[in-house]
């Protein structure tokens, strides 16, 4: 069985080897067993049911909660040359009948549907008349009330065990916690199924968390390393989403807003654009997420603190599904904590529930202020141990400076205590700095013994002290809605001088500048033009096929193309993610972009090759000019050069309304000279103004034609 599985992996999917536990899982299910699969996002869950689905007789049925996800999966399988369909309510009666017919005749390999659809008595009866290869229940955590995506329909899926006792069933999820896992095996009747648990680490994600200090500028600093990349910027409120999206657009970044307050068509349009276009930034509330199957999200930025580590892990997890380097970046401040506290205080739910939420927020804060490896803490939270610091987070790459904050902490805590634990951090800082204002005077706080004792630190530094005290549970913000700071039990030892406290020094503002060590760039600067050319070609093909670009090839495949630089179709077939079907369909097109010209080239020639490659990939001269930071005129000159030697077709370089091209060609040929006239001469003769560069290209094409004639 393993041999056959590997053969399918290479031949159809174009991958060289299985990852992690894929081979074991596939073996288990392909030989008729059940399985529970917990694997992080991007780990490669789909193959775990797709390959057994191919190896076993009959139809593989996949249950999935979201129609948008299904359509993507079906498109991906179709692109691989496999027969897949989705049954859902958006289909017409006719289409549904068509699919039913295919199923009856055994012409389908894969069928995707929503649970409510599957569980209709009619559907179940129909399926019982067919050969079923397996049932795969995707996003299986939806069965758990504990999770965030609970779907009541999922509870009924346990029935499958009775209706189809002979058919292997598997449940798959990326959710980490144990409780959900128990729910899944119990509710889906998979108690006896082996459980395949992969670690939850996402090694390609770089974690960075910075204290808020002019957050918009900080965001720009982070974005500077992500020109042309797709990413998500999460904000807490709808208003902030609108503001930030608008502001980013004003700064020249292609950004779209997404939140539950927008009309649903607009939301759908924005989501669709995000999926289909390269390099868009989605500014969103957490309403955006579930159902994002885009594999090349290069960064997730949080402009506000998420309410728990689970939420943080899930939201940042949307970056880098393709396994290429991705950034999880966050700016947070105490204001966020107040805000979340307020939301929590106003939320429904009993005290116990609120207390749990509160603990979760505390843990999140702890992650923000920790001075050791972030990944270690993150994984530890999910019960997993990373023996060594990861070397791929901000704290590992630039170890935080610490200072002995014991005295400062005592001052901070005692100002809170002496003012009656009824004031927020802003006021406490005013006390420490000895500021004179209305609030201080009306409370008589200028007489406190802590008044003005903290002048050796700046306001910024005091805020940092308070933040860290809260994050370490030495003080806590009251749920009274005013953000009053109270002392915790645990601060006693510190106050009595029995313990010391090392605090982290906040990085200074310059640290928010771009291009720091640590985060890896996916594409080397020198490869950018070719990369853009490959992306442009992919986009053109995607549009022609009516699918999102990553369905044609994921970014990881384009990256591997750049790395391997195949020079012929045979080598192209060795690129990761190019199976036989895709090789046949797209191999030649991509090869053309890659091969371009002779290998050794001077700088100028190289540039002209770049321009040519980009033109071949469907870019206009204006786009190429922007891409290569080269004047449009120069782009045209280079394209003309390529045309004159037959390396580029005229229609690939310019676009003119029908008729106009002939008029211009006539103008060139009508001159009674031996040689073709220059472009200036012709430009004067034409009635309509035409860019000189365009004339150069047309002239070059004529020269090539005449030379060849
Ligand atoms: P998940 O559903 O677990 O988030 P996917 O099934 O979407 O992950 O896989 C993530 C990416 O990894 C996809 O682009 C997929 O084609 C790729 N992939 C999966 N298995 C392998 C493998 N064995 N080798 C190389 N790439 C793989
Ligand atoms: Zn680390």
Image (cartoon, grey):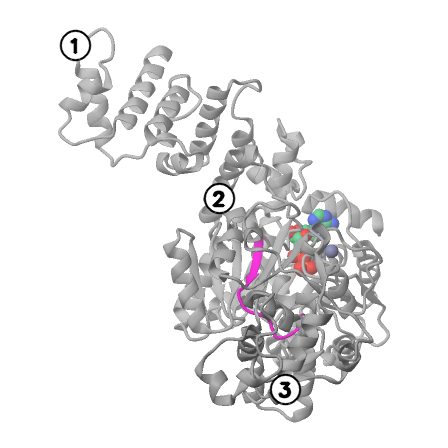
Give the answer, above or below, for where 515 lies relative to 212.
above
For residue 234, which numbered disc appears in the image?
none
Dots 3 and 2: beta carbons under 8 Å?
Answer: no
Q: Is residue 599 visible?
A: yes
Q: Is residue 168 visible?
A: no
| Residue 306 located within the stretch drawn in magenta | yes
Give the answer, above or below, for where 526 lies relative to 548.
above
Mark 1 crowdedness (10 Å alpha carbons): few <14, some 14-19, many ≥20: few
Dots 1 and 3: beta carbons under 8 Å?
Answer: no
Q: Quadrant of residue 170?
A: bottom right
Q: Is mark 1 within 8 Å of ligand 1?
A: no
Name the residue that disc number 1 marks. Answer: 672
Q: Is mark 2 within 8 Å of ligand 1?
A: no
Q: Position of residue 499 (x, y in %)?
A: 81, 73
Q: Position of residue 342 (x, y in %)?
A: 54, 84
Name the residue that disc number 2 marks. Answer: 541
- In front of the other: 514 or 149: 514
Q: Secondary structure at mark 2?
A: helix
Name the residue that disc number 3 marks. Answer: 418
Q: Secondary structure at mark 1?
A: loop
Comparing marks 1 and 3, which lies closer to the viewer? 3
Q: Which residues are magenta?
A: 297-309
N-terminal of the pair, mark 1 or mark 3, is: 3
Rounded to the nearest whole Å, what is the CA distance between mark 1 and mark 3?
A: 100 Å
The residue shown at (55%, 26%) is 595
Q: Secondary structure at mark 3?
A: helix
């Amino acid at each position: 069985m393993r041999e056959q599985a590997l053969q399918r992996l290479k031949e159809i999917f174009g991958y060289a080897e299985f990852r992690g536990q894929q081979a074991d899982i596939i073996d288990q299910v392909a030989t008729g067993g059940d399985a529970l699969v917990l694997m992080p996002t991007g780990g490669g869950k789909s193959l775990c049911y797709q390959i057994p689905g191919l190896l076993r007789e009959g139809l593989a049925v996949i249950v999935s909660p979201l129609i948008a996800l299904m359509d993507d999966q079906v498109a991906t399988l179709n692109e691989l040359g496999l027969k897949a369909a989705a049954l859902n309510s958006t289909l017409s009666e006719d289409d549904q009948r068509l699919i039913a017919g295919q199923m009856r005749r055994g012409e389908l390999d894969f069928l995707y549907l929503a649970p409510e659809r599957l569980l209709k008595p009619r559907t179940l009866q129909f399926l019982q008349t067919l050969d079923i290869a397996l049932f795969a229940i995707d996003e299986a955590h939806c069965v758990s009330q504990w999770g965030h995506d609970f779907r009541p329909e999922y509870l009924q899926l346990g029935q499958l065990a009775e209706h189809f006792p002979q058919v292997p069933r598997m449940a798959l999820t990326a959710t980490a916690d144990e409780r959900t896992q128990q729910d899944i095996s119990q509710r889906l009747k998979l108690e006896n199924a082996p459980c395949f648990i992969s670690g939850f680490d996402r090694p390609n994600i770089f974690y960075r968390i910075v204290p808020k200090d002019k957050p918009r500028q900080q965001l720009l600093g982070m974005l500077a390393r992500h020109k042309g990349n797709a990413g998500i910027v999460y904000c807490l409120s709808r208003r902030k989403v609108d503001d930030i999206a608008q502001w980013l657009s004003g700064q020249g970044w292609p950004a779209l807003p997404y939140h539950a307050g927008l009309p649903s068509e607009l939301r759908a349009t924005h989501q669709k654009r995000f999926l289909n276009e390269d390099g868009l930034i989605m500014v969103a509330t957490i309403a955006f997420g579930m159902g994002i199957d885009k594999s090349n999200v290069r960064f997730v930025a949080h402009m506000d603190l998420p309410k728990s580590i689970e939420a943080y892990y899930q939201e940042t997890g949307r970056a880098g599904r393709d396994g290429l380097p991705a950034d999880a970046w966050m700016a947070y401040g105490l204001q966020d904590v107040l805000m979340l506290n307020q939301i929590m205080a106003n939320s429904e739910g009993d005290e116990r529930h609120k207390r749990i939420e509160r603990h979760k927020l505390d843990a999140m804060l702890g992650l923000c202020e920790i001075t050791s490896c972030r990944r270690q803490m993150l994984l530890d939270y999910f019960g997993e141990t990373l023996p060594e610091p990861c070397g791929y987070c901000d704290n590992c790459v630039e170890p935080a400076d610490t200072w002995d904050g014991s005295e400062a902490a005592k001052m901070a805590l005692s100002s809170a205590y002496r003012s009656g634990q009824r004031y927020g951090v802003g006021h406490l800082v005013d006390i420490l700095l000895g500021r004179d204002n209305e609030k201080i005077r009306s409370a008589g706080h200028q007489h406190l013994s802590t008044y003005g004792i903290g002048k050796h630190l700046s306001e910024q530094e005091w805020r940092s002290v308070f933040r860290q005290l809260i994050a370490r549970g030495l003080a806590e913000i009251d749920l009274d809605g005013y953000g009053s700071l109270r002392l915790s039990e645990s601060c006693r030892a510190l106050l009595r001088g029995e313990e010391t406290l090392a605090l982290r020094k906040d990085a200074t503002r310059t640290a928010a500048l771009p291009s720091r060590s640590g985060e890896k760039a996916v594409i080397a600067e020198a490869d950018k033009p070719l990369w853009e050319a490959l992306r442009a070609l992919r986009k053109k093909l995607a549009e022609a096929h009516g699918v999102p670009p990553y369905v044609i090839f994921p970014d990881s495949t384009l990256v591997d193309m750049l790395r391997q630089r195949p020079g012929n179709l045979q080598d192209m077939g060795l690129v990761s993610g190019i199976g036989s079907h895709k090789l046949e369909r797209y191999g030649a097109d991509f090869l053309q972009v890659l091969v371009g010209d002779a290998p050794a080239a001077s700088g100028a020639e190289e540039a002209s090759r770049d321009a040519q490659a980009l033109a071949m990939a469907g870019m206009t001269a204006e786009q190429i000019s922007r891409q290569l930071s080269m004047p449009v005129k120069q782009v045209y000159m280079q394209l003309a050069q390529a045309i004159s030697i037959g390396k580029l077709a005229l229609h690939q370089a310019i676009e003119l309304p029908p008729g106009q091209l002939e008029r211009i060609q006539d103008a060139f040929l009508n001159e009674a000279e031996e040689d073709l006239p220059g472009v200036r001469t012709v430009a004067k003769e034409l009635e309509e103004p035409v860019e000189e560069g365009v004339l150069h290209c047309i002239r070059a094409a004529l020269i090539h034609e005449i030379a060849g004639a």
